[in-house]
Amino acid sequence: MNKTRTAALAALAVAVPLGLAACGGGDDDGAVTLRYAFWDDNQRPALEAMIEEFNTEHPDITIELEQNPWDDYWTGLDTQFAAEDAPDVFWDHVSRFPSYASNGVLLPITDRIEEDGLDTSIYPENLYDSWQYEDEQYGLPKDWDSIALVYRLDALEAAGIDPATVNDLEWNPVDGGTFVEFLQKLTIDENGNNALSPDFDAENVAQYGIAQASGTGQTDWWNFAVQNGCSLQSEPWGPYAIDEPECVEAIQFTADLYNRWGVSMPAEATNQPNGGLGAEYVVAGQAATTMDGSWMLGTYRDGLDPGTWAVADNPAGPVGSGSVINGLSNAIYAGTEHPDEAWEFVKFLGSEKAQRIAAETGSVWPGIASLNSVFADYWSEQGVDVSGFQAAAEGTTIGYPLSMSDAAFGTAALDEFNQVWLGQKDAQEAAEAVVEIANAEQ
Amino acid sequence: MQTLHDIDRPPRPTAAPRVRPTRRWNPKTTIEAYGMLVPSIVGFAVFLIAPIAVVVALSFYDWNFLSDPEFVGLQNYRDLAGDDRALRAIGNTFYYVLLNIPAQTVLALLLALALNAKIKARNAFRVVYVLPWMAMPVALGVIWRWLFDPINGGLNKFLALFGIDGPSWLTDSAWAMPVIASVNVWQYTGYTMLFFLAGLQAIPSQLYEAADVDGASKGYRFFKITLPLLRPAMLFVLITSVIGSFQVFDTIHVMTAGGPAGSTATLNYQIYLESFTQRNAGYASMLAVLLFAIIAAITLLQALFLSKRTVYDFS
């Protein structure tokens, strides 16, 4: 046998098992396998516990978890839709919902909800309604989240600040208010002087008052925007309106924390997507506070000793102390081969039984209103009062922007505002540029 | 004495033309040969030709992955003229290639010369310089990102020892691209060096001996013997590394994600952004066709300039 022939046979030997492997994976006799996609590693244990519970009633439905980190989750999902090979059930986010619903990749569940007589009043109305598009329901609420101020108790103690005062901080765009003063006291140089001291060395800061980092704006400037009466859009589904004066003022205030007051961890270190997150700098002790989402609580629990950190209400701006409230849903892929089983699973995930499991592990605020106390109880057992997130949800809060051009807005906003945080661009100019790009696709 | 002939000007044949051996078409061996080729032809068609054809076709469509593609003719191509981001990405790509290729090629050549000499631990050095190329680009990108971190990064902490206030390398639009280029130079220089080393070892030592007899200087030997005889290696290195650097992706994705303010978004990265964050798959396909055309044109130019094949007759 000559060399070429040996090589060809070797190539075949490699190719054949590949071909065989591609043929596997079918379901046998009545048993059904559903693929369930999600992104948050913190919630995996809760999901596994829920699936175990689901299988006691439905032993013939196997759930396969498919996990992808946030950044890869959506690109993966989009290409799976294109290949018509998407997971049967998946976590949906408000930012993606409009384009998914309008392009027909989500299974409408309005009729199924009616047929099964599902009581949807257990979900907060705005949370439930945010998954509607053209009179059809496209998912059941999985959870909700809001933003509150997370801070290091030990940093406050060292700065001589009474934690009881943190819930009543106020900011304004003119002189910064008590919020900026609070952050100045927490911004400390290597000689131990704070930012209010005449000897403060701004070049060698050991601890900043706040770390601001957000890939969208949700955990940085959106908060100040909402607290200043800016609602990001003219109306839900409408064009973006962040060039309005109340929005630009809030963007400028965010930039001021970096550049005018020097109390924010430098933008060089926090600009997304490649900078560190607020939680990382707080856990590392380089920042004393950060505005963070309720879904991040587990990171603080795992990174810090109990009793060294706490959650406070957001600072109040000129119109209030709200934030942007958001939630996720469990959605069904329109092209699923097992719509009935997928609906059974989604119905279960939306049930009190399932959401109690999530709430008991403290992973996320549950989508069912009556279970909020279960989540809060978990955290009070950990020594953390999480009512700041509820206060934020009840404040002058707005929903997450609903728009078909979320992707264009998100990319443009990050591009432009990163420069504003670095002190390289004017807030008004940046806001106008973002609006122009985002609304061009309307 | 050795003589060099360019193949472009071959010596006139003096003997009678060679008689070509007659070849008979043998159906049996032909079928057998094509049978052997089938697996690789199928692979080639399915994994290379088909995707290219699909991308070219998609460049005439508007497609968001979710609904059916819509034919828009040349609209994507026409939109390019008004697309500042894409045009900037083209500029960024050339800037990156210019930062990357000359430095990488010269360094690799110098290293090859040094490691071709009889020095101690020569093989150990050769391995060390190739190591970065053997490592995962994404993992390296993450580590370099830490090193270049403006506050906690190793580089600025090191510079601070000498009282130097280091810039914010990856968030400063003037620095970001040079930093990315230097990381890639670091990563690929050792690999490029290997080809120069092979080229150097293929140069017959008689040439240098003869030059020594003639009393040629080191510089003269380098420019008249080494460099000309490295031409095949140079051609290969330049073509592959230029194509590679036009397609740079992973380092950028991990270290800057195209930022700050789009200053490190090369054309290849812009294709990714357009398709997978903006869901403009048709428009991104048009950009991919454009990148293909640019690379093809440049490769053709390189081949024209460098491919005068030289044959060496040492008889």
Image (cartoon, rainbow, N blue to C red):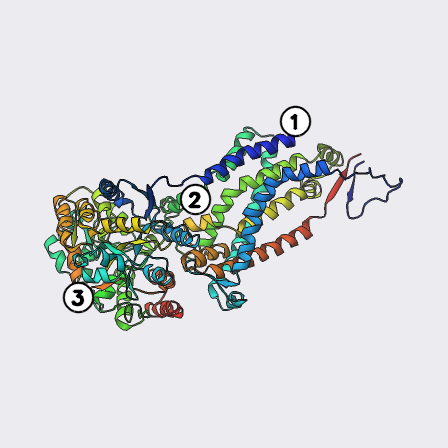
Chain bearing mark 2: B
Residue A275 at x, y percent in the picture: 34, 51
In this rendering, the answer to whether B231 lies above or below B66 is: above
Callout 3: 10 Å neighbours few (<14), some, many (20+)? many
Residue B25 at x, y percent in the picture: 76, 39
Q: Secondary structure at mark 1?
A: loop
Residue B249 at x, y percent in the picture: 47, 50
Name the residue carrying label 2.
Answer: B138
Q: Secondary structure at mark 2?
A: helix
Numbered marks: total: 3
Badge 1 and badge 2 both on one subunit: no
Closer-to-camera residue (B95/A400) = A400
In this rendering, the answer to whether B65 lies above or below A173 is: above
Task: Give the residue type at disc 2.
Answer: Val
Disc 2 to disc 3, C-alpha distance: 44 Å
Chain bearing mark 3: A
